Amino acid sequence: MRLLNRTAGRLSRHRRGPLAGLVVLLLGLVISGSLYTAFSPAQADSQPSETDQVAQGKELFLASCSFCHGQNGEGVPTVREGYQLGPSLVGVGAAAVDFQVGTGRMPMVQPGQQAPRKPPVFSDEETAALAAYVASLGPGPAIPNESDYSIEGLSEEEREEAISRGGQIFLTNCTACHNFNGAGGAMPRGGYAPSLHGVEGKYIFEALLTGPQQMPNFSNGNLSPEEKRDVIAYLDSLEDNAEYAGFTLGGLGPVSEGLFAWLLGIGGLVGAAVWIASHTTRTKKSKVNP
């Protein structure tokens, strides 16, 4: 008991010493630093700050995009009045960049009437950085989330209703250019409506939202996010439907079907009529002149 009292007295005297507070403070800092090092660095390193992402995007933009779009995304005019080598990107938003760069349409190999889809040049991380930088130039449409263009969370009945609504919207607004089954088609002045077969839902949503190249802009005021999602659901349903009608002829509708009918259908009938007529003439001549 006396030993215990002596030990307690010594500890009490040390706690009141001038170095006791400093020791406690250093011990607390060591423990806090150890806990932070153990639990937080992986998260901090895996998620760069928005400022760093914008800075990275600016470097990529200056190296790969500024020749056509200007040092600050203001666009580059040409000698011909009213035309630009590259349009202004102020206010186009991150969604436009994600669509153009993610589908490989940008950067273009050379200026042209329309940028075709090709393998992307930039990685997903670089595309996100470019989108963040362009978004910092002015407010514009953001990159959609998967919940915006997917019907995975809906029930079977709700999915069928979404596909039906999307089909009506697509047939009303899109078939003039993309054909009734999304196969695409020719456009004036050397342009074309690309095929929508196999295109990811995110890029279709972004194309509807931003109106790239000759496509009209279906903002959320014109076509709600739910209606855009329904259009994507309809296009996805076309991928799952089997073709039961024989030759699809490219899915181009009455143009290819009419051409097929004239060349093979009527052309075959004309050929058969000529053959029958010539064969009949030979038969009569052989009977008259045995």
Image (tube, helix red, strand yellow):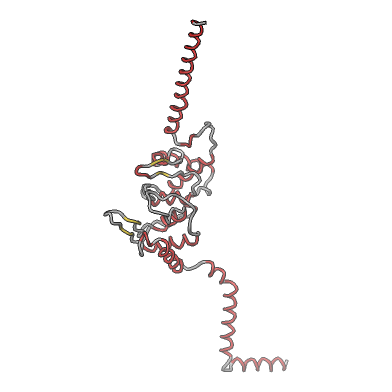
Q: Residue at x 45, y 21 (%)?
A: 270
Can you say which quadrant of the picture contains the N terminus? bottom right
Q: In the picture shown, does residue 267 fall above or below 23?
A: above
Observer able to see residue 95: no
Q: Is residue 207 rendered to the left or right of residue 286?
A: left
Q: Is residue 150 rendered to the left or right of residue 218?
A: right
* x and y, in percent, of residue 225 in the image: 42, 50
Number of numbered discs on residues? 0
* x and y, in percent, of residue 251 in the image: 47, 36
Q: Nearer the viewer, residue 55 or 85?
A: 85
* x and y, in percent, of residue 239 in the image: 52, 41
Observer able to see residue 17: yes
Please identify the quarter of the rendering in which residue 2 is found. bottom right
Q: Which residue is outermost to the left?
A: 81
Q: Residue at x 46, y 47 (%)?
A: 229
Q: Nearer the viewer, residue 143 or 197?
A: 197
Q: In the picture shown, does residue 270 fall above or below 240?
A: above
* x and y, in percent, of residue 279 in the image: 49, 14
Q: Is residue 198 rendered to the left or right of residue 58?
A: right
Q: Residue at x 72, y 93 (%)?
A: 3
Q: Nearer the viewer, residue 239 or 186?
A: 186
